[in-house]
Image (cartoon, helix red, strand yellow):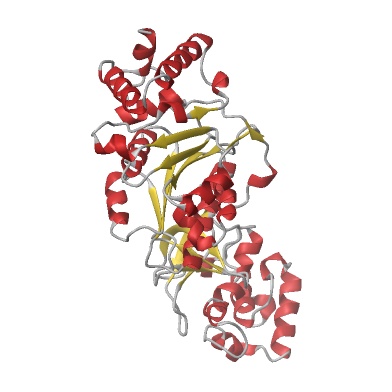
Amino acid sequence: MALTDQHLAELHQRARELGVPKYRMLTRDELIEAIDSAGDAGGGREEAVDAGIERPRREPERQARGRDADKSEQGGPEEDEAERAEPDTEEVSGVLDRMPQGYGFLRLGGLREAAGDVYVSASQIRRCELRPGDEVSGPARPPRRGERHRALVRIEAVNGQSPEEERRHFEDLTPAPPSRRMFPPDAELDPLVRAVDLLGPLAFGQRVLVLAQPRSGRTTLLRALGSAIAETDAHLCVLVADERPEEVPQWEQALPQAEIFAATADEEPREQVREAELAMGHAKRLAEAGGDVVVLIDSLSRLALGYRDPARVKRIFGVGRQLGEEGSGSLTVIATVLDSDDRGAEVREAVETTENLLLRLDAGLAAKGIFPSLVARDSRASGEDQLRDPEELEKARVLRTELAEMEPEEAAQALADQIAATSSNAELLSRL
């Protein structure tokens, strides 16, 4: 059949087989001319059939695996019928991990490389202006001959939005002081969360630094905070850095509503850093799209081992902020630092004073069964006047002054007793 007699879908199919670039952007006449030229140049059917086979001499292995996806210009809004009818497709959604060569993979089960990852072509990434950490959804087809991974047929959503929508860039948005509290004063919360909120209070867009001695209850505190935050509308992520692998399922069990990103101790330091930065990229993408995102990090000290430079974790902690533009969200970072050795001291020096809320946990208090094991006089908050009304602010200051005048054990016990005797922080402060 002559090209002039073929349907547009058939022309698209032929153009894809011949590797005609950007064929969807061509008019019908331009498309026919491009197909004729590609055929005359010897591209032919043989070249198209061979395109899915790995060619290590001509391009990197992983790029070759997705060559079909690249040539087919998958993911555009004008998908032809042949592509829509791709058999055995499955809807997938994952976090984009972009390779230096321009293509990428959707990580579907955490951020580690896995056999079930889905290839995303460089052309799809360019066309939709995808960035590391984007949550991408769409149908994926099975691997063809010579391919190891499934390939994304088209992109249907990016961070829950149409890929055609204009997207903001986190770094271009205006940081603003935290102004929205996570929990109202009369909320009935876990005692650990209430203690932090009394010393804080907690707000979206904060950078919360938890200085914790070993065995001071930092994991218990983070999980309590996570459980309370999961009851809000925030998107909760947990980044576990350089911890024992068996701790990951424990986190998953404790916080089933959260995304758990684990860079565990059995991984190479550079992989831990890659996964941590990808997790934070994912959090930024969600925040710039308008979501309130909270990331719990345990711990910055362990993450610094992967960087080999404690000062570099500052850019991980420092992304926490409220975004000032209308329709933008916030990114809250609640991170621990192990307050026990020189490494912890270096990390603390790198990030301290950049926080909105500083908390200190004491192992001696935890050993005596006093929870929360917070040292009230070593804790501090900034911007509190933007979060509390004048009466509540005054009473919170009175409480902290009283606790600061006590010895740490006496203060921690007094705070625990007051929390136990009341149903909310509003009730506690009203009694002062």
Residue 426, quarter of the rendered image: top left
Q: Residue at x 52, y 79 (%)?
A: 65
Give the x, y percent position of residue 15.
64, 77
Between residue 56 and residue 190, name the one nearer to us.
Answer: 190
226 to 423, vertically: above or below: below
Give the x, y percent position of residue 306.
50, 62
Give the x, y percent position of residue 248.
32, 55
Between residue 125 and residue 276, name the one nearer to us.
Answer: 276
Give the x, y percent position of residue 187.
36, 21
For this orientation, the residue located farthest to the left is 369
Between residue 77 and residue 238, name the one nearer to us.
Answer: 238
Q: Residue at x 54, y 87 (%)?
A: 49
User: Can residue 53 be seen?
Assistant: yes
Q: Residue at x 40, y 42 (%)?
A: 212
Residue 421, quarter of the rendered image: top left
The N terminus lies in quadrant: bottom right
145 to 243, vertically: above or below: below
The C terminus lies in quadrant: top left
Residue 191 lies left or right of residue 71; in this view the side is: left
- Total marks shown come to 0
Residue 34, quarter of the rendered image: bottom right
156 to 430, vertically: above or below: below
Residue 366 lies left or right of residue 172; in this view the side is: left
Between residue 360 and residue 248, name the one nearer to us.
Answer: 360
337 to 353, vertically: above or below: below
User: Can residue 159 be seen?
Assistant: no
